[in-house]
Amino acid sequence: MSLHLTRDRLHTFAAKVLLIALSGCAMEVPYQPTTLIANPAGMSGSTARTTALTHFRLSTGYERTIPAMTEFVRVGEIPAGVVMRPISYVLTVEGANVHEAYAVVNGSRLVGFYLPFEHAFAPLSESVPMKFSERGE
């Protein structure tokens, strides 16, 4: 009988370990390949600074905040909008993996992120306002 109790305890322990391991798995950041059309050669991108913090939630459940006064440089465009690279701030998006990210802005809204190493666009499920003050070329 003690063998039976030990086996039941072992199965219960194994089930708990499996549940804990599975709950720690994050989903991947969804993205699709895209082509970045860079600023014309010989032209520096215009810069802009955020005037307010920008808070967003990814579909993976992770949240990020881009601080106010973060300076960005325009690096090009993709079909979803203008691609802006932070100058002195490393922006990342996170799921099962962490990806370096550039902001993709359409009008005055953050619509997603350009992932430079993946050459891909990761859209936000809901765009959020992103306020800039232009700094020139």
Image: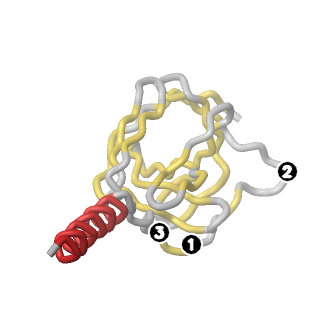
Residue that lies at the very extreme toward the front in this rendered image: 1
For marks 2 and 3, the one nearer the N-term is 3
Q: Left of 32 or right of it: where is 55? A: left
Image depth: mark 1 or mark 3 in front: 3
Q: Amino acid at mark 1?
A: Thr
Residue 35 image-quadrant placement: bottom right
Q: Quadrant of residue 95?
A: bottom left
Which mark sits nearer the N-terminus, 1 or 2?
1
Q: Are marks 1 and 3 in contact (CB under 8 Å)?
A: no
Task: In the displayed orientation, state which residue is furthest to the right.
Answer: 42
Mark 3 surroundings within 10 Å by alpha-carbon count, few (fewer than 14), some (14 through 19), many (20 or more):
some
Q: Residue at x 17, y 70 (%)?
A: 5
The image quarter containing residue 9 is: bottom left
Quadrant location, the C terminus: top right
Which mark, by number, is residue 34? 1
Where 31 falls versus 69 (above or below)? below
Number of the label disc, if any, that sits on residue 42: 2
* For the residues bearing labels 1 and 2, Cβ distance under 8 angstroms: no
Q: Position of residue 62 (x, y in %)?
A: 37, 48
Pointer 3 residue: 31
Amino acid tagged 2: Gly
